[in-house]
Amino acid sequence: MPGPIEFWFEFASPYGYFAASRIDKLAEKHRRPVGWHPFLLGVVFKATGGQPLTGIPMKGAYSRRDMERTAGFLGVPFKLPEPFPFLSVAPARAFYWLTDNEPGRAKALALAVYHAIFGEGRVIDKPEQVADIAAGIGIDRSALLAGMAEPKVKDRLRAETERAIAQGIFGSPFVIADGEPFWGHDRFDQLDRWLDTGGW
Amino acid sequence: MPGPIEFWFEFASPYGYFAASRIDKLAEKHRRPVGWHPFLLGVVFKATGGQPLTGIPMKGAYSRRDMERTAGFLGVPFKLPEPFPFLSVAPARAFYWLTDNEPGRAKALALAVYHAIFGEGRVIDKPEQVADIAAGIGIDRSALLAGMAEPKVKDRLRAETERAIAQGIFGSPFVIADGEPFWGHDRFDQLDRWLDTGGW
C-alpha cells in the first residue's frame, strides 16, 4: 500500500490555508492518506534567511493581491488578519497534543483554526483562543489547555520543526510524496500527475 | 478591441522560458496580442533586495529540482546552463534593436535565444553568440551586432527595466493583463480564467 502524502504547513501561512482546503480531495482521488504536520516557519526562516512575504518590497504588495485573487479562484473565503504574520505556536502545540491524545480530531482542529485565521481574518495566537475554537468542535477545552502546556508537547513541536528543516522544507505549504518535494499549493497540478504516474 | 497581454521576462530566467513557451497559445485562445518585454532582473533585485533563486539556502536546491520537473510536466527540453545566472544584457539589447528595426522578428529571436539557453543549456551572454543565433533564423548578423552597440538601444533597455520596476514587477515571468498583475508561469491558470471572465 502506498505511503501517506506528507503535508507540512505553518498556521500563519495563507498559502498553507489554501493547500489545506484542497489536500484531502487530491489525496482521496489517489487513495492516499495524508500526514498533517504543522511547523514554525519563523524558525525555518532563521535557518535559511527567509522572510515573511508580505513585508518584502514590491513582492509584499503583490502577495496581498495574489492571496485575495487566489482565494476567489479557489472559491474559499479569505481575509488577511492584522497584524500579519503572527506566532503560531499555540495552534501548532494544540495540534500535536491532539495527535497524541485524540488523533481523530487533530485535522478537524487544524481546519477550524485555519478557517478562523484566514476565513474570518482573526489573529489566533493565544492558547485560550485555540481552546475556544477546539471547544466549538467538541474537544475538551481544559484538557487541551493543560495539554498545550506540557513540556512534551513543546518538545514535539520543536522536533517537528527541526525535522522539517532536515528535510529541506523552507516554505509553507510543502508536500512530500514518495520522496518528491512540492513547494506551494500551485504545484498541486504537478503533484496530482506525479501521484498518477509515479514521476516522469 | 481588448489591449495586449504584457509579458515581462528576464532571458536568464528558467520560469520565463517556461512562460515564453506557453504565452502565445494562451493569448490566441483569448484572441489577444502579446507584448514581449525583456528586462534585467539583476537591476530589479538591486532595487528590491531580491536574489537569484538557485543560490538561496535550501530553496536553491529545491528550485533546480522544480525546474527539471516543471520542464518535464510541460514537455519542453531543459538544461540549466552553468554558470547560472548570467548577465542577459546582450540578448535583451538585440531584442529591442529588432523591435525598432525588424519588429516581426523580435519574438522569434527571443524564442531562439531561450531555446539555446534552457533547451540546450548554453550561457548566452556575448553579442556574438546572440548574433549567431539571430543569423540562424535569417537576421542580418552584422546589422544586429552594430545595432546592439547603439547608445539608443542601451538606453531603451535601461528605460524598459525602469518601467518594469515602476509597475511593481519584481520577478520573471510577470504578466500584466488589463491592469491585473500575475507573477510566475504558475499563475497561468488564473490568468486564463481572468481573460475569460474579466475578474472575479
Image (cartoon, coloured by chain):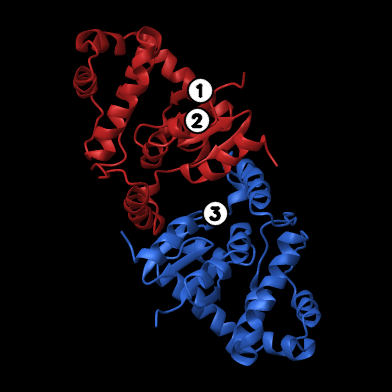
Chain colours: A red, B blue
CB under 8 Å between callouts 2 and 1?
yes
Residue B144 image position (x, y, % from top left): 72, 87
Q: Which of B130 and A18 is in front in this view?
A: A18
Label 3 residue SS: loop
Residue B40 appears in the figure = no
Q: Disc 2 is attached to a residue of which chain?
A: A
Which residue appears at 33% of the width and 56% of the height? A65
Q: Which of A49 and A4 is in front in this view?
A: A4
Mark 1 belongs to which amino acid? Pro
Which residue appears at 58% of the width and 32% of the height? A168
The reply, left or right, for residue A20 in relation to residue B23 is left
Quadrant of the frame with the C terminus of chain B: bottom left
Residue A178 appears in the figure = yes
Residue position marked by numbered label 2 in the rendering: A27
The reply, left or right, for residue B72 in relation to residue A189 is right
Q: In which quarter of the image is residue B197?
A: bottom left
Residue position marked by numbered label 1 in the rendering: A33
Label 1 residue SS: loop
Residue count near mark 2 (Cα–Cα under 10 Å), binned few <14, some 14–19, many ≥20: some
Mark 2 belongs to which amino acid? Ala
